Amino acid sequence: MARDVQIKESPEYVKLSLAAAMTLGFREGRFYRNAKLHCLNLLVTYEEGCFANCAYCGLARQRSGKFVHKSFIHVEWPIYQLKAVLERMNEYENGLERICISMLTNPKASQHVVEIIGNIRAETDLPLSLLITPTILEEDDLLRFKAKGADRIGIAIDAATPGLFERLRGRPVHGPHRWGKYWETISMALKVFGKGKVGVHLVVGLGETEKEMMTVIQRVHDLDSYTHLFSFFPEKGSLLEDLSRPPMGQYRRIQLARFLIEENMTSFKNFTFDERERIGEFGIPEDKLSPVINSGLAFVTAGCPGKDGKMACNRPYGNSSPGPNIRNYPFIPNSEDIFRIRQQIWDY
């Protein structure tokens, strides 16, 4: 006789990032340099998975063999009952300052996210963000999300140019996503949630030049939105599993340039680029640039803020493995980190 197997799907169940599972005591482990997670990252989950097929993603529909459903952003995302997650969240003194729910490209996700928001709002008043999938959403969905209690929206464009977006997320990989739809949804989200309440995810190292990446970062800033940077990490079993990570110098220069733009200290028109479209100058005097580097803030994870207005979504080691070459710092870099960062910025 066949054994009954309970299917653990949203909205009753969610996936937790490994960092979140550790923070809530579901998993054992320690954070490198005693980093603390400040945003509880949830991901909807379905037996059939995601219907998209992005070339770099661990959730891609056609991700090969033994790797399917095993990891996302290079770490495991275990499944837990939402009720148990909320109970643990209330039990633990864990320093959480925000909750973020991430969607999949699955037609059930929109309604289930509404239900999950409602269940969370019944237990906590922590600020709540959504990382949404524009392909399956319209403006009415955004209005429902806000009415239920979400205060910010994240949209993962990821690829910096229309050509890369199409090649890695669209028709060539049999994916449903379209560049235009994503930018239309950014405009809708700004209309519904307001200026400064929309974050755009971009992944450095998918084949773009530094000039191309800075072009789109300036575009996002001009829309009164924010950029959340990620460094490409090859997911085993994905179509881009053999693509190398971007050089550290490339990532550091883009981190610094993004920070300067978002702090209104310079703009894209003031940058200079070499023949390979790498950043040469940031358009800011050295006596102003050096203190910015020394503060370390440009190299801290960019994410949604908590109630105090400070960055809450710090995703410890979601961008790189723990160790001295952290790409997104989940805390303020110390003097040794800054010394290393200064060397990395100008490493071409």
Image (cartoon, grey):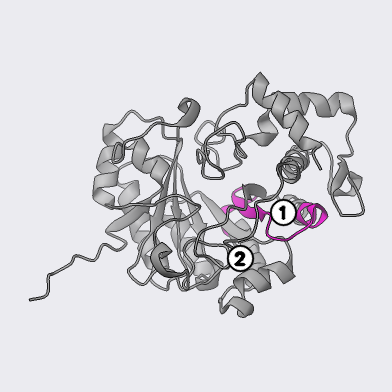
- Vertical position of residue 171 compared to residue 75: above or below: below
- Vertical position of residue 148 compared to residue 332: above or below: below
SS for tag 1? Answer: helix
Which of the two residues, 1 or 260, is positioned nearer the viewer here?
A: 1
- Vertical position of residue 193 compared to residue 178: above or below: above
Residue 179 visible in the displayed image: no
Location of the N terminus by quadrant is: bottom left
**Residue drawn 17% across the image and 67% down it:** 5
Locate residue 331 relative to residue 13 in the image: left or right.
right
Specify the amino acid type for callout 1. Val
Q: How many marks?
A: 2
**Residue drawn 63% across the image and 61% down it:** 157
SS for tag 2? Answer: helix
Percent across and percent down for residue 41 are 43, 47
**Residue drawn 63% across the image and 71% down it:** 181
Which label was assigned to residue 72? none
- Provide the residue span drawn in magenta: 191-215
Is residue 121 on the magenta stretch? no
Q: Earlier in the sequence, mark 2 or mark 1?
A: 2
Q: Mark 1 — residue?
A: 220
**Residue drawn 89% across the image and 39% down it:** 283
Location of the C terminus by quadrant is: top right
Residue 255 visible in the displayed image: yes
Number of residues whose C-alpha sits closer than 10 Å to that of mark 2, classed few (under 14), some (14–19) or many (20 or more): many
Locate residue 227 relative to residue 127 in the image: left or right.
right
The CA distance from mark 2 to mark 1 is: 13 Å
Which label was assigned to residue 185? 2
Percent across and percent down for residue 73 are 50, 52
